[in-house]
Image (cartoon, grey):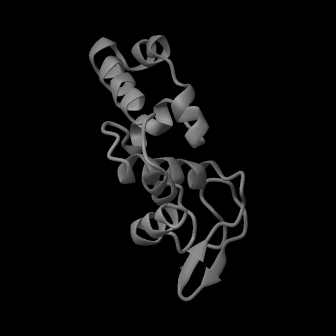
Amino acid sequence: EIIKNCPSCDTILVRVKDQLFCHNISCSGKAAKQVENYTKVLKIKGFEPNTIEKLEILSIQDLYNLNKKDLIDILGTTIGTKLFQEIEKAKVLNIGDFLAACSIPLIGKTAAKKSSNANQ
């Protein structure tokens, strides 16, 4: 049986071309997936779904607001320090990579690169 409601926020799902989508902008599951995609595209290591959930990251801003002390308190010294270093490295990036990582519909790596080079 096909589910009708989002398992994260209980919003009614919308069917688009045989796929179900949650259109609730406040959905925690959807937000976590966007953060997961962002870290994956930018190759920020260590942010698997369970880590994102444990750290209660619901936005890209939350990711960059994490501080070393909180990471160490939640994940331990070794992992917390490594993740903090990964976040710090990701603070310097070009606009094309940032656009590609933001989960903007129809904007992948190629379109983001072309868009970022358009003003040069």
Please tell me in which quadrant of the rendered image residue 109 appears. bottom left
As displayed, is residue 85 above or below residue 77?
below
Q: Is residue 2 visible?
A: no
Relative vertical location of residue 93 with respect to residue 11 in this rendering, above or below: above
Numbered marks: total: 0
Q: Which residue is pictured at 49% across the width and 38% down the height? A: 53
Q: x%, y% of residue 79?
A: 30, 22
Q: Residue furthest left?
A: 78
- Nearest the camera: 104 or 57? 104
Residue 11, horizontal then vertical, whole percent = 72, 63
Depth order, front residue of 20/104: 104
User: Which of the pair 108/21 is nearer the observer?
Assistant: 108
Q: Residue furthest front?
A: 120
Above or below, 90 relative to 9: above
Evaluate whether residue 78 shows in this view. Answer: yes
Residue 110 as seen in the image, left or right of residue 3: left
